[in-house]
Image (tube, helix red, strand yellow):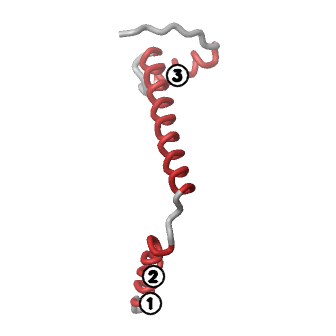
């Protein structure tokens, strides 16, 4: 296992210690691990979203591809026995 060393300011250390006291994390190291994991996952999800957006921007859906959904929704509303 790789070991990382980082300096943090006193306010951040106090906040981490509060998380430990509340049982949110087990230790400072646990807090750092969970924080890094969250950052990596957030970045991965953002990249995926950016790729999806780029795909739809480059190849937008056509009316034929999505028009049926609007028609089906309108028909379901019309069929309601208000």
> Which x, y percent locates residue 67?
47, 76
Residue located beneath label 2 in the image: 71
Mark 3 secondary-structure assignment:
helix
Tell me: residue 55, above or below residue 82: above
Tell me: residue 37, above or below residue 50: above
What residue is shown at x 47% (from left), y 40% (from top)? 45
Question: In which quadrant is the N terminus drawn?
Answer: top left
Give the Cα separation between the discs numbered 3 and 1.
Answer: 56 Å
Give the Cα separation between the discs numbered 1 and 2.
Answer: 10 Å
Tell me: residue 28, above or below residue 56: above
Front residue of 51/2: it is 51
- Residue found farthest to the left: 1
> Which x, y percent locates residue 44?
47, 36
Front residue of 30/40: it is 40
Categorize mark 1 by other alpha carbons within 10 Å: few (<14), some (14-19), many (20+). Answer: few
Residue 9, which numbered label? none
Of callouts 1 and 2, the N-terminal one: 2
Mark 2 secondary-structure assignment:
helix
What residue is shown at x 50% (from left), y 74% (from top)? 63
Query: Circles 1 and 2: CB distance less than 8 Å?
Result: no
Q: Quadrant of residue 79?
A: bottom left
């Amino acid at each position: 296992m790789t070991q990382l060393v980082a300096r943090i300011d006193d306010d951040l250390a106090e906040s981490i210690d509060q998380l430990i006291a509340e049982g949110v994390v087990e230790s400072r190291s646990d807090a750092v691990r969970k924080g890094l994991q969250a950052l990596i996952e957030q970045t991965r999800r953002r990249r995926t979203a950016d790729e999806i957006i780029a795909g739809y921007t480059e190849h937008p859906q056509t009316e034929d591809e999505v028009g049926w959904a609007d028609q089906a929704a309108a028909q379901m509303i019309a069929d309601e026995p208000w």
